[in-house]
Amino acid sequence: MFPINAQQFNSQVPVPVRNQRLCGNPSCRQPGHTIRTCNHSSVAELRALAVNVSNYSIAYQYPEFIKRWVSTRLHTTSISILFAKVVNSSIITRVTLGEMKEAIIHHYYQRILSIPLADGTINESRIRELASISFTPMIISGLRDLMESLGVQYRVLPGERLIRDHNIARNNLAFYSTRLATSSRRMDALIAEHAETELLREAALQVYIRMEDEMEEYNRTHTNGVLNQRKFPDMAVIIKPVQDPNPEEVVAAEEFGDCPICMEPLDEAMVEINCGHKYCDLCITRYLDTLRRNQDPTCSMCRTGINCMMFRNESSRKIVDDKYCAPVQEPVV
């Protein structure tokens, strides 16, 4: 076996690397530094939020705001990061969590109020005025929400109260305008439905009245479901004598004209009433059937009362005679 060179042996054996601790910031977790020296973006955001809370507490005199924010909202890791930035040291020993909180509150509130201005004087009202310059409405709204979540009651300035009342009135106006439009649409629908209901009611009432009239007429003209035939005792039904016409006048004699009711040509079954107007027997019988008890038969053409009807057809005369009145034979001259 050949001897092994010690230098060659050392180069072949890997040298163990010491485990490096990771940053305690949950958003970072990178090796090479600790949480107290971390420069992650989350640390910058935390410090910016602390500056905003500090400036708002100083500008509007809310020391309770920064105290509750540090005491109840910040996690132990965030407190350690802010405390390390406050004391500018990465090596902090024998400091309790309560002392860290007091140091942060003192640094971000009491110390700022005691900083001299450019002229060397300490003016708290001027410091508060300078602290309120950097705020925008969005930042103020976010800090107000944070105060409400922490249970800190904030004062409303007169201008803010006016703006808030204006916004509330505008929202109420929009809400009630929407409700008014909805109610108007519902009222219009109800009015239209009511109008349709009224029309249906009127139609049903007319049908009911017509049915009542028809029932009354039926009860008046019927007995036990059988039609009561009306008689006309003062009306005579006779056979008009037909003389032998001249042969040259046969065609003219057969042309009786048209019935004024049905407009059909008249034939031997026609009826001539006492005023001289002629009708077909079917139309005159239908007319007599439609008369009420208090109505007298009249001519449809001249409104003359009918008291005599003359037939050329015996069968038609017999139907009218049996149905309406007693026969009277006209004397032959």
Image (tube, grey):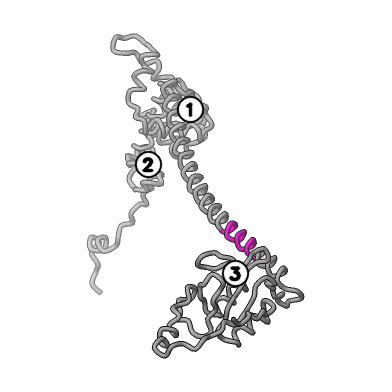
Q: Quadrant of residue 11?
A: bottom left
| Residues packed near mark 2 inside 10 Å, few (<14), some (14 to 19) or many (20 plus) | some
- In space, the residues marked 2 and 1 are separated at their CA atoms by 30 Å
Going from N to C along the chain, the mark reached first, 2 or 1, is: 2
Query: Residue under circle 1?
Result: 65
Taking depth in this image into account, of 90 and 301 the one nearest to the observer is 301
Q: Which mark is residue 264?
A: none
* Amino acid on which disc 2 is placed: Thr
Give x and y (percent) for residue 315.
Answer: 60, 87
State the residue lying farthest toward the right: 224
Can you see residue 314?
A: yes
Q: Bin the neighbour count of mark 1 within 10 Å (Cα to Cα): few under 14, some 14-19, many 20 and up.
A: many
Residue in view at x 47 percent, y 73 percent: 260
Please report the residue visible at 46 percent of the width from the left and 87 percent of the height from the top.
245
Relative image position of residue 84 (x, y in whole percent): 39, 32
Q: Which residues are magenta?
A: 200-211
Q: Is residue 20 above or below residue 212?
A: above
Look at discs 2 and 3 and give the one toward the viewer: 3
Instruction: Name the residue tied to disc 3.
Output: 306
CB-based contact (under 8 Å), mark 3 and mark 1: no
Return the residue at label 2: 34
Sequence-earlier tag: 3 or 1: 1
